Amino acid sequence: LIRAEVTDAPLRTLVLNLLTAHEPVLKTLPGSAKRYYPFAGGWLEHTLSVARSCAWLGERYAAQFPELNPPLNRGLVVAAAALHDLGRVREYDAPPGRPVRDTVPGELFGHLFLAYDLIKGAARDVPDLDPELLDLLLHCVITHQKLPAWGSPSLPCIPEVLILHHADDLDAKVEMYA
């Protein structure tokens, strides 16, 4: 999905590098500690579902609103979807067969800022990455919860965040309902 949808090569490299670097943990991590996808592998199921929805919604709204300036960036939406909960790798201590616990960094900072640090650190190894595109990706990740009451430090400033927010929220809520 990342290879097909993220057309900016440095951004694609950043996303694939992060997913590969954290692959063993991401494969067994729950989506959340208690609410949605609270089982081993739940992070992967949730993230893939959100990324697929973002790819579809990105295509739909790019076609519906071609006059947007700048145009809606589908690759950015999918990249942000793939990384939106990456901070969970540092937020949770989730040993197989044992209850999930928050780590000290998880308690202190939460997954949004932990993801910010992971992405910003990995971006140093992608020299051709456009700094403005990196800032937009980071904005998507740290504001995808949309509301300060839900943990976002600020409100979304670009439409890509709204797509990510609603895809993420809907997926989590439907899974909880099911």
Image: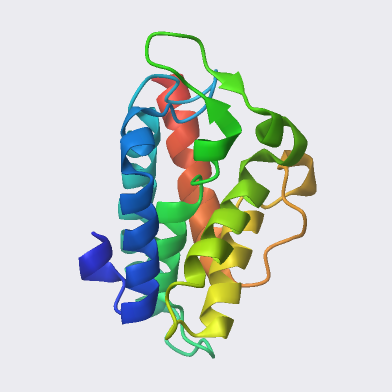
- Residue appearing at x 61%, y 56% in the figure: 117
Q: Is residue 172 above or below residue 132?
A: above
**Quarter of the image where the N terminus is located:** bottom left
- Colouring convention used in this rendered image of the protein: rainbow
Which residue is at the front of the view, 118 or 76? 118
Where 60 falls versus 167 (above or below)?
A: below
Residue at left 27%, top 69%?
Answer: 5
Asked if one can make out residue 57 in the rendered structure from this viewpoint, the answer is no
Q: Is residue 92 left or right of residue 146?
A: left
- Which residue is farthest front? 125
Establish if 124 lies above or below 170. Answer: below
From the viewer's perspective, tell me whether residue 78 is left or right of residue 32.
Answer: left
Q: Residue at x 48, y 45 (%)?
A: 168
Q: Which part of the image, by quadrant, shows the C terminus?
A: top left
In the rendered image, the residue lying farthest to the top is: 98
Q: Nearer the viewer, residue 103 or 167?
A: 103
Give whichever of 120, 162 is nearer the camera.
120
Q: Is residue 157 above or below residue 142?
A: below
Residue 53 location, x and y as percent?
35, 52
Q: Is residue 131 visible?
A: yes
Rendering coords of residue 149 (x, y %)? 78, 41
Instruction: Give the image location of residue 83, x and y in percent.
Output: 45, 54
Residue 176 image position (x, y, % from top left): 47, 22
